[in-house]
Image (cartoon, rainbow, N blue to C red):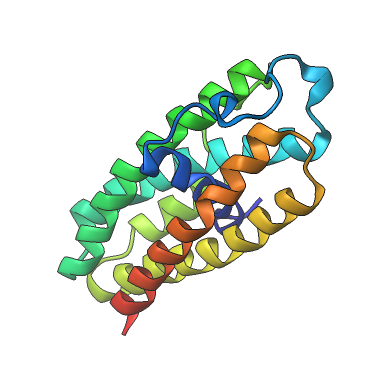
Amino acid sequence: MSLRVAFAGAAAVAAMALLGGPPVSALGGPPVSGQAEVSKQDRKFLRLAHQGNLAEIAAGRVARVKGADDAVRSIGAVLVTDHTRLDEAVKEVADRLDVTLPDRAARKDRMMLRHISRMHGRAFDRAWLTAMIAGHRQALRLGEQELRDGSSPAVKELAQAAAPVIRKHLDELLQAEK
């Protein structure tokens, strides 16, 4: 799994946490307990979202310190805050659905961030922004896939609520890239 894919999964659930909405089970869907109600697609989405959140938090922390441009540092701080919050929502839904989440970001994502972290100045900013932009574009596609193929109302609600936040992050990243 690439850093882009992990970031994409994470961004796909950002809105629920950012909007401070009620727990997904309170949104009028059926109760969200028991693995039998969760499709392979839903489990995959939750795992990617969680791993992506972990990767985004780490990437944001690195950008806050290493970013040469104020915008990169600022966006990094936003990603740390937003993805820390949204991961709580992912973990809550996964817990209620009995979906086991990985304990850390995917190995490829950790290696990619390690590679980017070795860069300095504008080279770091460019590589970091490129990874974040690609990830948010992929996140939009992954969210659409969950909405199309997922079966859990709780997981689909996370994907649906995330789209505006993903677009907002993507717009900010594209603006910083200019």
- Residue 146: x and y, percent? 72, 48
Question: Residue 106, can we see it?
Answer: no
Residue 37 percent across, percent down from the top left? 80, 23
Nearer-the-camera pick, 170 or 113: 170
Residue occupying the far front of the picture: 28
Q: Is residue 154 left or right of residue 166?
A: right
Q: Which residue is at 37% across, 36% downward?
A: 20
**Residue 139: image location, x then y, percent:** 58, 58
Q: Nearer the viewer, residue 28 or 133?
A: 28
> Residue 149, how many percent across, how many down?
81, 48
Query: Is 159 situated above or below 173?
Result: above
Of all residues, the one furthest to the left in this rendering is: 70
Q: Is residue 100 visible?
A: yes
The image quadrant that residue 57 belongs to is top left
Relative to 173, 24 lies left or right: right
Question: What residue is rendered at 60% in x and 47% in y?
Answer: 159
**Which quarter shows the C terminus?**
bottom left
Residue 49, quarter of picture: top right
Q: Could you tell whether 122 is left or right of 85 in the image?
A: left
Q: Residue at x 43, y 56 (%)?
A: 165
* Count of marks placed on residues: 0
